[in-house]
Image (cartoon, grey):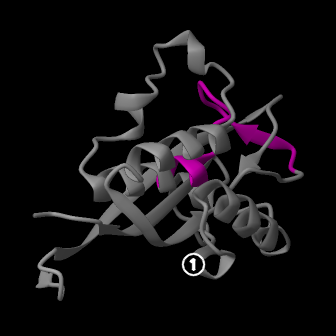
Amino acid sequence: MSVLSDGQLLAIRTGLGYDSHRLVEGKRLVLGGVDVPHSHGLAGHSDADALAHAICDALLGAAGLGDIGTHFPDTDPTYADADSIGLLRRVRALVEVDHAIVNVDSTIHAESPKMAPHIPNMRARLATALGIPERRVNVKAKTGEGVGPVGTGQAIEATAIATLYQRDVA
């Protein structure tokens, strides 16, 4: 931590997020708030947007506010089929009580479909939900190279890291 000229302490906080969902028939595939055309979608209580969920956990972790399941439990029918971008907006509101979002970096782990064509739209949707410029939101995609549930097309995972500025820690 550093001390600013007005005596306030400067604290940068970092959080890591992760989420994974099985691919199933009969559901739409939503990642980063974007409908991605595919034969399968992600199974889950909400819309199962693994990318948005990983970012929620990264933000909550950086702020020391627990995890997404604490705030939006899958046992609560209120969140059945919930829009995960809406949940991300709610996480933003919780985090912004004492913090400013500096940036988010994330990775989608999926064998298919190809994510590259959808990443610009994902970045735009996520940046809007987070209230930060797109240049401060990064989304990458990696395959599983045929290994594990991701590589065999059984699941999609996402990881994210978020950096926050804690406004006044004194």
Decide if residue 140 is on the left or right side of residue 114: left
Name which quarter of the figure residue 115 lies in: bottom right
Q: Is residue 19 visible?
A: no
Which residue is located at x 48 percent, y 21 percent? 74
Q: Between 105 and 50, which is closer to the camera in this rendering? A: 105
Seen as rendered, the residue at the extreme bottom is 5
The vertical placement of 135 against 169, above or below, is: below
Q: What quarter of the picture does the N terminus occupy?
A: bottom left
The magenta segment: 38-54
Residue type at the position of mark 1: Arg
The residue under label 1 is 136
Query: Label 1 crowding class (10 Å Cα cut-off): few <14, some 14-19, many 20+?
Result: some
Judged left or right of residue 56, residue 155 is: right
What is the count of numbered marks?
1
Q: Residue at x 58, y 58 (%)?
A: 130
Q: In this orientation, which residue lies closer to the viewer: 106 or 104?
A: 104
**Hey, which residue is sitting farthest front in the picture?**
6
Q: Tell me the element at label 1.
A: helix
Image side of residue 96 versus residue 33, left or right: left
